Image (tube, rainbow, N blue to C red):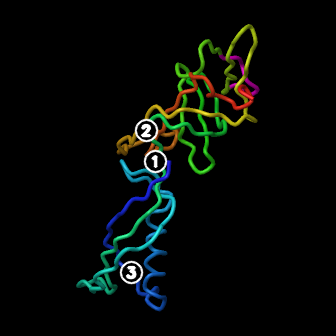
């Protein structure tokens, strides 16, 4: 789920940060650039782990600030296919479920990946539905209070759209698709 990735970045250090220790000011700038951002094929940047090397410090013409080449390691969130993760229900509609890990909300379980047989019932909110698994003549609902285990089936990095329609949901640079259709998956309360 979490990986250590090594990156190299050319960084222009603003002059007002030159009075701080070099490594601290560079680490602060790297954090402002990378934290909570998704890098395609690497995942979501969670934290700067360490700085391996700092080279340069050249002031380029017309810049007025030193530019460094920094090699650093970063902790990345990148779930792998087949991994089982626990999450909370964020939204439920006719297309399936949206789950949240607390720091990452773009986890989707499509209706066809829910336990079979599942059906939807009207929810409290007209835009939401409540999904219910029917097993041995008993109903097992998926509700907001439950912690839900899901298996990762796909991790996608969609291309950045040039234009977005007004009123559409925000662009998600990393999408995790999951499944609940297996023993031990779904709300933990089903299995204890």
User: Dot 3, crowdedness within 10 Å: few (<14), some or many (≥20)?
Assistant: some
Mark 3 vs mark 2: in front: 2
Does 96 appear in magenta? Answer: no
Magenta region, residue range = 120-126
Measure the C-alpha gap from mark 1 to mark 2. Answer: 8 Å
Q: Which residue is mark 1?
A: 78
Q: Quadrant of residue 69?
A: bottom left
Q: Check the image and report above or below for 15 versus 94.
A: below
CB-based contact (under 8 Å), mark 1 and mark 3: no
Q: Which residue is mark 3?
A: 13
User: Dot 1, crowdedness within 10 Å: few (<14), some or many (≥20)?
Assistant: some
Measure the C-alpha gap from mark 1 to mark 3. Answer: 29 Å
x then y, percent, for residue 48: 47, 67
Q: Which residue is mark 2?
A: 155
x then y, percent, for residue 11: 35, 74
Dot 2 falls on a residue whose secondary structure is strand
Measure the C-alpha gap from mark 3 to mark 2. Answer: 34 Å
Classify residue 32 as left or right of residue 86. Answer: left
> 89 and 5: which one is in front?
5
Dot 3 falls on a residue whose secondary structure is loop
Q: Residue at x 76, y 12 (%)?
A: 138
Q: Residue at x 60, y 37 (%)?
A: 99
Classify residue 124 as left or right of residue 41. Answer: right
Dot 1 falls on a residue whose secondary structure is loop
Classify residue 53 as left or right of residue 136. Answer: left
């Amino acid at each position: 789920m979490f990986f250590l990735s090594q990156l190299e970045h050319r960084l222009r250090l603003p002059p007002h940060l030159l009075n701080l220790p070099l490594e601290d000011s560079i680490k602060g700038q790297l954090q402002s650039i990378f934290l909570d951002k998704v890098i395609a094929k690497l995942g979501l940047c969670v934290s700067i782990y360490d700085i391996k090397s700092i080279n340069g410090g050249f002031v380029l013409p017309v810049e007025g600030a030193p530019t460094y080449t920094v090699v650093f390691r970063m902790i990345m969130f990148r779930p792998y296919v087949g991994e089982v993760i626990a999450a909370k229900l964020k939204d439920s509609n006719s297309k399936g479920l949206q789950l949240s890990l607390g720091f990452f909300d773009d986890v989707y379980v499509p209706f066809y990946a829910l336990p079979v047989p599942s059906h939807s019932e009207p929810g409290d909110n007209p835009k939401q539905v409540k999904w219910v698994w029917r097993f041995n003549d008993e109903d097992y609902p998926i509700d907001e209070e439950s912690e839900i285990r899901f298996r990762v089936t796909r991790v996608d990095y969609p291309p950045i759209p040039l234009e977005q329609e007004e009123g559409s949901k925000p662009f998600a640079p990393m999408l995790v698709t999951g499944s609940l259709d297996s023993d031990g998956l779904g709300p933990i309360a089903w299995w204890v």
